[in-house]
């Protein structure tokens, strides 16, 4: 349930007070664990991000400031609306959402509008849904208030420029930084960490000769840069194992070298209609000592991966590894719950910057 009302910018807080006074008889608690600022450009993805925010609020009531910039508007404008959101059906808790629609010269007014409505003494999470490698007048003023900036690499047309920009921003701003697509690869990173968890298996991993990653090529209106999660996983693995990229082809074939030998890696695609766009489907790895590791999602159980490990002389019993759910908004919830910036993420970005 929501209560929404269009208001003038200077009437945001007074009108919110009126709504809360009207709710007083219901014993509804005004809850806010943090401030969530969302910036997006008006597009087909706007409703997608609204849905993400709704999922976050259901788990963590917070004050949301949702900014929508309209680059195609004929005239400058600054429009505001307030919403009281009830995350639970019993209406025992509720929180505020302030919507800001902006175009043209009115962008200059947004930081002055937002600042009085940030709840003091609470963390500020900034979800920046546009490509950070492209200049935007609102990024710097919003970033300086943020405790943590969460990016969405799906917006990046050039992953090399994206990686380079994020690494520069980390050094310049010294803020906690996260990425929704990086969060979506967590299950596969956990799978590798749990599978190659002994000295013997880790030695086999260091002897890798070929690596193939397969992703879901099903495009949607919200996702079209489908190789990013696979690139992140490749960047992470190669950075952890000390591989140096020597050659890359346009069809996503890579030649790496470590201290001892060369490694061939490839990224390929398959089509699964009932699984998320760009989701990693399988990983196949073969080593110089004859070990073959294969992890593939199970069609009937999308979040289960069947693990097969064999050698020239033996074959282990297959087993299942359960990946995390890929529900809408889950990656943002994960990144809000975390602290700091993943050193593995930064290392993967450095690797991507070097071999793209």
Image: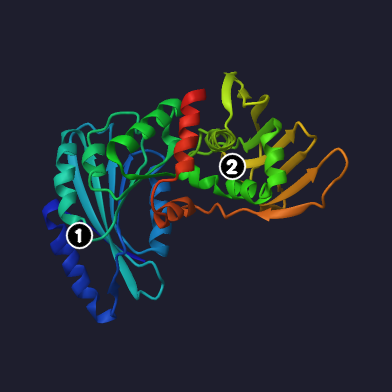
Label 1 vs 2, first from the N-terminus: 1
Q: Residue at x 37, y 38 (%)?
A: 43
Q: Is residue 326 above or below residue 223?
A: below
Rendered image quadrant of residue 139: top left
Q: Quadrant of the N terminus?
A: bottom left
Residue identifier under label 1: 120
Q: Is residue 60 above or below residue 68?
A: below
Query: In terms of secondary structure, where does tag 2 sit?
Result: loop
Rendered image quadrant of residue 324: bottom right
Residue 111 horizontal/vertical position (percent): 17, 44
Give the numbered dot on residue 110: none
Residue 48 horizontal/vertical position (percent): 43, 47
Q: Residue at x 78, y 45 (%)?
A: 309
Is residue 356 something one can see in this rendering?
no
- How packed mark 2 is, by other alpha carbons closer than 10 Å (few <14, some 14-19, many 20 or more), is many
Mark in the foreground, 1 or 2: 1
Is residue 113 something one can see in this rendering?
yes
- How packed mark 1 is, by other alpha carbons closer than 10 Å (few <14, some 14-19, many 20 or more), is few
Left or right, 330 with reference to 193: left
Rendered image quadrant of residue 158: top left
Residue 273 horizontal/vertical position (percent): 64, 43
Q: Is residue 191 above or below residue 85?
A: above
């Amino acid at each position: 349930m929501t209560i929404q009302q269009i208001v003038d910018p200077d009437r945001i807080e007074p009108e919110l007070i009126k709504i809360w006074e009207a709710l007083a008889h219901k014993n509804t608690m005004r809850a806010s664990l943090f401030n969530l600022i969302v910036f997006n450009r008006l597009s087909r993805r706007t409703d997608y991000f609204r849905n993400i925010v709704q999922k976050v609020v259901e788990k963590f009531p917070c004050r949301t400031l949702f900014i929508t910039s309209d680059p195609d508007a004929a005239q400058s404008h600054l429009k505001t609306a307030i919403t009281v959101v009830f995350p639970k059906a019993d209406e025992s808790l509720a929180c505020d959402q302030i919507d800001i629609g902006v175009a043209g010269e009115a962008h200059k007014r947004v930081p002055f509008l937002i600042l009085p409505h940030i709840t003091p003494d609470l963390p500020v999470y900034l979800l920046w849904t546009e490509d950070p490698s492209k200049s935007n007048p609102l990024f710097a003023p919003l970033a300086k208030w943020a405790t943590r900036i969460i990016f969405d690499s799906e917006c990046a047309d050039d992953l090399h420029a994206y990686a380079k920009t994020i690494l520069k921003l980390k050094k310049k701003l010294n803020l906690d930084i996260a990425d929704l697509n990086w969060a979506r690869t967590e299950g596969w990173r956990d799978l590798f960490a749990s599978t190659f968890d002994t000295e013997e298996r880790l030695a086999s991993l260091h002897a890798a000769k070929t690596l193939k990653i397969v992703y879901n090529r099903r495009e949607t209106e919200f996702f079209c840069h489908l190789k990013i999660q696979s690139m992140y996983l490749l960047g992470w693995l190669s950075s952890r194992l000390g591989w140096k990229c020597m050659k890359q082809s346009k069809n996503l074939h890579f030649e790496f070298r470590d201290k001892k030998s060369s490694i061939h890696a490839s990224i390929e695609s398959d089509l699964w209609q009932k699984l998320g766009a760009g989701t990693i489907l399988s990983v196949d790895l073969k080593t110089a000592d004859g070990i073959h590791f294969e992890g593939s999602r199970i069609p009937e159980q999308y979040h289960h991966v069947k693990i097969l490990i064999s050698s020239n002389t033996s074959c282990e019993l297959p087993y299942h590894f359960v990946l995390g759910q890929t529900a809408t908004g889950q990656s943002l919830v994960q990144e809000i719950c975390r602290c700091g910036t993943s050193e593995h993420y930064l290392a993967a970005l450095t690797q991507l910057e070097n071999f793209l």
